[in-house]
């Protein structure tokens, strides 16, 4: 059985473009999400629950199916568990066809690569900022608030919650300054 899956998104809010693309295949049924939200994919969740071995989920392109590479891996794992397949028209992906590596494995490599790229770019950006003398990390609390919090603490007349309410200095920040 071939099940078409569509969901609205910015460039296709009424799913017309997707419906046109799905017409190139004979689908047994089409399931449509009512909204574009990535958080509430009830129709997709139900589809993954209902799918049987040998069934195919047909989408116009991968973005319709998954909002992130991580989500795509989850969907592919669910399909693999159910012995079902994915057919994505725009990317010309058909998981029924054998490759040297499975499509899921390739996507897992892409996820790791994407994570590494973001991590490396972040580290490089932090390093350059430090070289330029820029402050990185969370902004420091104003010194007058810190001094006031230390004075209040040392007077032993205020609780930690009162100090926090009046100065905005947390217990951990206060203790860090007291250690210095």
Image (tube, rainbow, N blue to C red):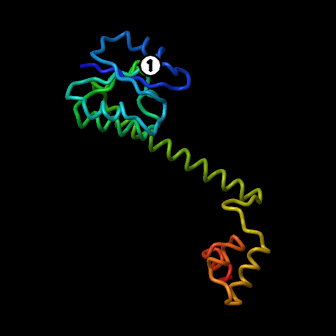
From the viewer's side, name the closer residue of 111 and 143: 143
Splitting the image into 4 quarters, where does residue 138 fall?
Answer: bottom right
Residue drawn at (64%, 51%), measured in percent from left and top? 124
Residue drawn at (22%, 31%), measured in percent from left and top? 83
Splitting the image into 4 quarters, where does residue 180 fall?
Answer: bottom right
Identify the residue position indicated by label 1 in the image: 90
Residue 46 image point, x, y percent: 31, 33
81 w.r.t. 20: above or below: below
Q: Residue furthest right?
A: 144
Residue drawn at (50%, 42%), measured in percent from left and top? 114
Tell me if 68 is positioned left or right of 25 in this view. Answer: right
147 w.r.t. 155: above or below: above
Q: How many numbered tags mark residues here? A: 1
Residue 176 image point, x, y percent: 64, 77
Classify the position of the N terminus by image quarter.
top left
Residue drawn at (55%, 25%), measured in percent from left and top? 10
7 w.r.t. 113: above or below: above
Residue 56 image point, x, y percent: 28, 23
Splitting the image into 4 quarters, where does residue 106 fall?
Answer: top left
Q: Residue furthest left?
A: 53
Residue 3 image point, x, y percent: 30, 21
From the viewer's side, name the closer residue of 176 and 20: 20
Q: How dense is the environment of label 1, judged by Cα within 10 Å: few (below 14), some, or many (20 and up)?
A: few
Q: Secondary structure at mark 1?
A: loop
């Amino acid at each position: 059985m071939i099940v078409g899956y569509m969901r609205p998104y910015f460039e296709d809010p009424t799913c017309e473009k997707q419906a046109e693309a799905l017409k190139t295949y004979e689908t047994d049924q089409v399931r449509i999400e009512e909204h574009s939200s990535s958080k509430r994919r009830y129709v997709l969740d139900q589809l993954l629950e209902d799918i049987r071995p040998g069934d195919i989920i047909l989408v116009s392109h991968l973005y319709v199916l998954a909002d992130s590479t991580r989500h795509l891996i989850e969907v592919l794992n669910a399909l693999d568990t159910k012995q079902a397949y994915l057919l994505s028209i725009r990317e010309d992906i058909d998981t029924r066809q054998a490759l040297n590596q499975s499509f899921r494995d390739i996507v897992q490599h892409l996820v790791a690569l994407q994570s590494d790229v973001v991590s490396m770019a972040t580290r490089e950006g932090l390093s350059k900022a430090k070289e330029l003398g820029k402050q990185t990390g969370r902004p420091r609390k104003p010194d007058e608030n810190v001094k006031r919090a230390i004075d209040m603490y040392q007077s032993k007349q205020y609780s930690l919650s009162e100090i926090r309410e009046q100065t905005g200095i947390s217990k951990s920040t206060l203790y860090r300054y007291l250690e210095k």
